[in-house]
Image (spheres, rainbow, N blue to C red):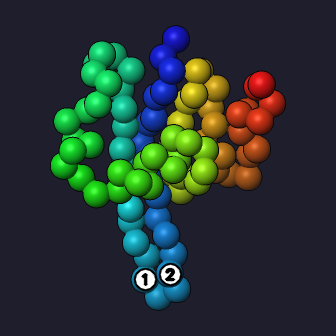
Amino acid sequence: MTLIEIESVSKVYDLGEVQVRALDDVSLPSNTGNSCPSWVRQVSGKSTLMNILGCLDQPSDGRYFLEGVDVAYGQGQTGGIGTRR
C-alpha cells in the first residue's frame, strides 16, 4: 500500500471577483518510487500542497489517499482520517 497518493488535485481560492488557482490538476503517481517528484522544485503551490497533505486544508477538486483512505473531503463528505486512529 502507498503511504500518500494524490489524483488530479486542484485548489482554487475565491477572493470575490478574482479566483486564484494555487494547484491545477496535480497528481503523485504511486509507481514512480521517487520521494520528491521533479515538478515540486519547479512549480508554485508547494505550501498549498503541503497543507492538503497535512489535512490542514481541503482540495477544491481531486482525491487524496493517506494509507489507502480517501481523505480529500470534497462534496460534503467527512473523509476517513478522523475515524482511523
* Most distant residue in the right direction: 83
Name the disc covering residue 57, or none. Answer: none
Q: Is residue 63 visible to us here?
A: no
Q: Residue at x 74, y 45 (%)?
A: 77
Rendered-image quadrant of the C terminus: top right
Q: Residue at x 44, y 36 (%)?
A: 7
Distance between mark 1 and mark 2 Cα atoms: 5 Å
Q: Is residue 23 left or right of residue 64?
A: left
Dot 1 and dot 2 residues touching (CB under 8 Å): yes
Q: Position of residue 71 (x, y in %)?
A: 63, 37
Identify the image quadrant of residue 55: top right
Q: Is residue 74 visible to us here?
A: yes
Mark 1 lies on residue:
18
Q: Secondary structure at mark 2?
A: strand
The crowding category of the residue bearing disc 1, from other C-alpha atoms within 10 Å (few below 14, some 14 to 19, many at least 20), is few
* Most distant residue in the bottom direction: 17
The crowding category of the residue bearing disc 2, from other C-alpha atoms within 10 Å (few below 14, some 14 to 19, many at least 20), is few
Q: Is residue 71 above or below residue 30?
A: below
Q: Is residue 58 above or below residue 8?
A: below
Q: Position of residue 15 (x, y in %)?
A: 50, 81
Q: Position of residue 67 (x, y in %)?
A: 58, 21
Q: Is residue 22 above or below residue 25?
A: below
* Most distant residue in the top direction: 1
The amino acid marked with disc number 1 is Val
Mark 2 lies on residue:
15
Q: Residue at x 43, y 76 (%)?
A: 19
The amino acid marked with disc number 2 is Leu
Q: Position of residue 36 (x, y in %)?
A: 29, 31
Q: 83 or 16, which is in the foreground? A: 83
Q: Is residue 73 left or right of residue 16?
A: right
Q: Is residue 64 above or below residue 19?
A: above
Q: Secondary structure at mark 1?
A: strand
